[in-house]
Image (tube, grey):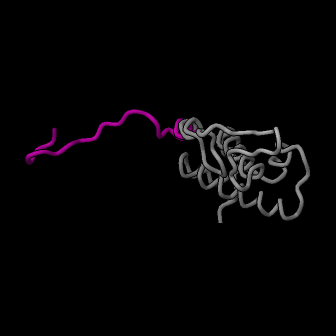
Amino acid sequence: MVQPLADLEQLTARLGYRLTDPERVMAAAALADASALVRAYGAPWPNPATAPAVAVSITLAAAERRVRNPEGYRAEGQGGYSYQLPATAPTGVALTDAEIRLLRAEAGTGGLYSVPIERHGGTL
């Protein structure tokens, strides 16, 4: 198993509170899941110590979203209070389009490509 791109200490610093033991287990899983997505859209980055800062930052942001909202709620209300996330807001460890673009740019996989097209026996 590949090591996550960020660790629990970094995630806890972002959250601003101490995690309970069950939350630590969930947070570790969220870091592993987010790291897998970041690597899938970016590059393998096998050594977290040499991974680009943007990859680590996106990993932490995605894991933080999962820890803060484990059920993926978009809205909640009680009495006169209500709160709603935009429909476009990511939930869980899903990455935003902007995060994916940043990862692809960092990995050098974004941009224009030329693809030969064959037709009627010849290349166009």
Stretch of the chain drawn in magenta: 103-124
Q: Is residue 23 left or right of residue 50?
A: right
Task: Let me know if residue 48 appears in the view.
Answer: no
Residue at 82% in and 38% down: 80
Q: Is residue 26 left or right of residue 98?
A: right
In this view of the protein, which residue sits in the foreground, 23 or 47? 23
Which quadrant would residue 4 be assigned to in this image? bottom right
Image position, residue 97 (x, y; %): 55, 38
In the image, residue 98 lies in the stretch drawn in magenta: no
Which quadrant would residue 23 be assigned to in this image? bottom right
Image position, residue 63 (x, y; %): 72, 50
- Image position of 46 with respect to 21: above or below: above
In the image, residue 119 lies in the stretch drawn in magenta: yes
- Image position of 107 with respect to 93: above or below: above
Residue at 55% in and 41% down: 100
Residue at 15% in and 42% down: 123
Which quadrant would residue 83 be assigned to in this image? top right
Image position, residue 59 (x, y; %): 68, 47
